């Protein structure tokens, strides 16, 4: 039997596609070899995982998750969480990581998204907002925590230069570490790699790339050597982010979970956001595209959504899980986008409708590798104002209003 056919048969058996094995018989034929080659080109693990999500929903295996709602916590509990987080911060066990490697295509900003200047009074960039939040934390903890910033390969130099220009916004320069995430080729709708100016077109491998990039950049080793145990991880575009929020860190520690995630209530059944659920007795995340109507509309007797908690992109990961994830590939999802490319003649093609597939991994796919995930629900108007689009929902103007009211005691 050819090695390839053998490999394909084992691959099928591993991911529940045994019914494909008879198509490779007789195993020495030309047809079998061709079929095996085809099989090996596909990610069967991804197919199995995606199908499991669909089947679980259909068979009502997705249950409402248990969530800790901060709004209903008494002062003593909140203080307990806060103090526990603050003491971990003070003893040097916490670092923050910003995932700033996205391309921000919807916002249409040229350059690193973190440098985008928001129409606030005074004008501020995303990086400046995060620095300020870390400076507020410094005032509470009387120390600066390490801040790691993940950029794409194309934005690395510009990001570093921007921080240099802005004198690190008054945060300790020796506390800030930049690292890059890996890139992956962009293909056309037929799976052919696109080229621009005689260079293979690449895009960042998604925010799930954080784990392997922490490892390959040497930062994981550095974190371990410096006895960091808890990593606060966030995106770049939420202007209400509370960097390394002590209460949130305390929540992760007291729950002894390897991932803590913040959530907020969705605005309505049609909001384009993923939600938390309980699957196989553990917290999982359903992407917006995977939510069926039953899940989107389900409410309890008080009219509250059963699956109403959207992810707001703030996490605390335990370092041991990060280490495990750094060597464990997450599945790729596809995003169809308009991408400029060039022909061998040098002619540039500027498509008006999606012509390309970008492959991305998502951080929340790491949930299935965790021993325990706990979710903390926080008030949306205090902690979640993402900037995704130039206009309309989640625009810079929306964020400016929410940001100006963030400390309003009546809100
Ligand atoms: P989004 O999914 O909103 O993507 O990223 P984006 O690239 O910023 O925006 P669009 O889709 O191109 O308009 C959520 C968070 O994950 C980070 C982003 O920087 C943002 O903070 N991210 C995303 C990465 O760090 N790397 C990636 O490859 C993708």
Image (cartoon, helix red, strand yellow):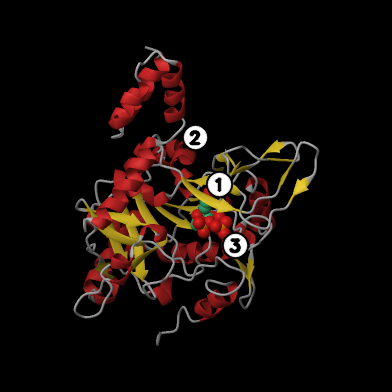
Residue 175 is at least partly visible in this image: no
Query: What's the distance in space between the residues labelled 1 and 3, CA to CA?
Result: 14 Å
Name the spot of residue 180 as percent of width and height, x first. Answer: 56, 43
Q: Does residue 351 sit above or below 402 in this rendering? A: above
- Sequence-wise, which precedes: disc 1 or disc 3? 3
**Under tag 1, what secondary structure?**
strand
Using residue 344 as the reference point, say whether residue 170 is left or right of it: left
Q: Nearer the viewer, residue 326 or 74?
A: 326
Q: Which residue is mark 3?
A: 106
Q: Do the numbered discs 2 and 1 sit on residues whose CB atoms are within 8 Å?
A: no
Q: Nearer the viewer, mark 2 or mark 1?
A: 1
The CB of the residue at mark 3 lies under 8 Å from ligand 1: yes
150 vs 96, nearest the viewer: 150
Q: Residue 79 lies in what quarter of the image?
A: bottom left
Indicate the quadrant where residue 23 lies: top left
The alpha-carbon separation of the residues under discs 2 and 1 comes to: 22 Å
Q: Nearer the viewer, mark 3 or mark 2?
A: 3
Q: Closer to us: mark 1 or mark 3?
A: 1
Cα distance in 3D space between marks 3 and 2: 29 Å
Q: Image point 30% across, 54% down: which residue?
A: 284
Q: In the rendered image, which residue does mark 2 sit on?
A: 216
Residue for badge 1: 358
């Amino acid at each position: 039997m050819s090695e390839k056919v053998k490999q394909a048969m084992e691959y099928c058996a591993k991911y529940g596609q045994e019914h494909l094995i008879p198509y490779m018989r007789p195993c020495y034929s030309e047809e079998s070899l061709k079929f095996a080659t085809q099989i090996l080109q596909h990610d069967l693990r991804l197919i199995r995982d995606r199908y499991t999500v669909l089947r679980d929903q259909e068979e009502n295996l997705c249950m409402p998750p248990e969530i800790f709602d901060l709004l209903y916590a008494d002062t003593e509990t909140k203080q307990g969480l806060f103090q526990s987080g603050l003491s971990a911060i003070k003893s040097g066990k916490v670092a923050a990581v910003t995932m700033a490697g996205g391309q921000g295509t919807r916002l249409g900003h040229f350059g690193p998204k973190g440098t985008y200047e928001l129409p606030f009074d005074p004008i501020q960039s995303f990086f400046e907002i995060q620095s300020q939040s870390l400076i507020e934390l410094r005032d509470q903890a009387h120390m600066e925590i390490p801040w790691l910033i993940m950029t794409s390969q194309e934005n690395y130099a510009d990001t570093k230069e921007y921080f240099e220009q802005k004198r690190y916004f008054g945060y300790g320069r020796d506390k800030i570490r930049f690292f890059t995430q890996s890139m992956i080729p962009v293909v056309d709708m037929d799976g052919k790699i696109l080229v621009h100016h005689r260079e293979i077109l690449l895009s960042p491998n998604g925010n799930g790339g954080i784990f392997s990039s922490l490892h390959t950049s040497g930062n994981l080793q550095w974190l371990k050597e410096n006895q960091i145990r808890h990593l606060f991880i966030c995106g770049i575009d939420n202007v209400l982010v509370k960097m390394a929020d002590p209460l949130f860190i305390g929540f992760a520690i007291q729950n002894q979970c390897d991932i803590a995630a913040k959530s907020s209530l969705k605005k309505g059944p049609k909001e384009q956001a993923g939600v938390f659920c309980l699957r196989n007795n553990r917290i999982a995340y359903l992407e917006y595209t995977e939510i069926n109507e039953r899940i989107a509309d389900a409410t309890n007797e008080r009219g509250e959504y059963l699956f109403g908690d959207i992810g707001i992109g703030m996490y605390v990961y335990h370092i041991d899980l990060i280490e495990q994830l750094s060597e464990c590939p997450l599945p790729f999802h596809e995003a169809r986008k308009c991408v400029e490319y060039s022909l061998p003649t040098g002619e540039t093609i500027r498509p008006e409708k999606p012509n390309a597939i970008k492959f991305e991994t998502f951080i929340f796919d790491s949930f299935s590798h965790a021993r325990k995930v706990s979710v903390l629900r926080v008030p949306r108007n205090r902690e979640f104002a993402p900037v995704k689009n130039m206009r309309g929902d989640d625009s810079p103007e929306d964020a400016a209003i929410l940001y100006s009211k963030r400390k309003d005691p009546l809100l």
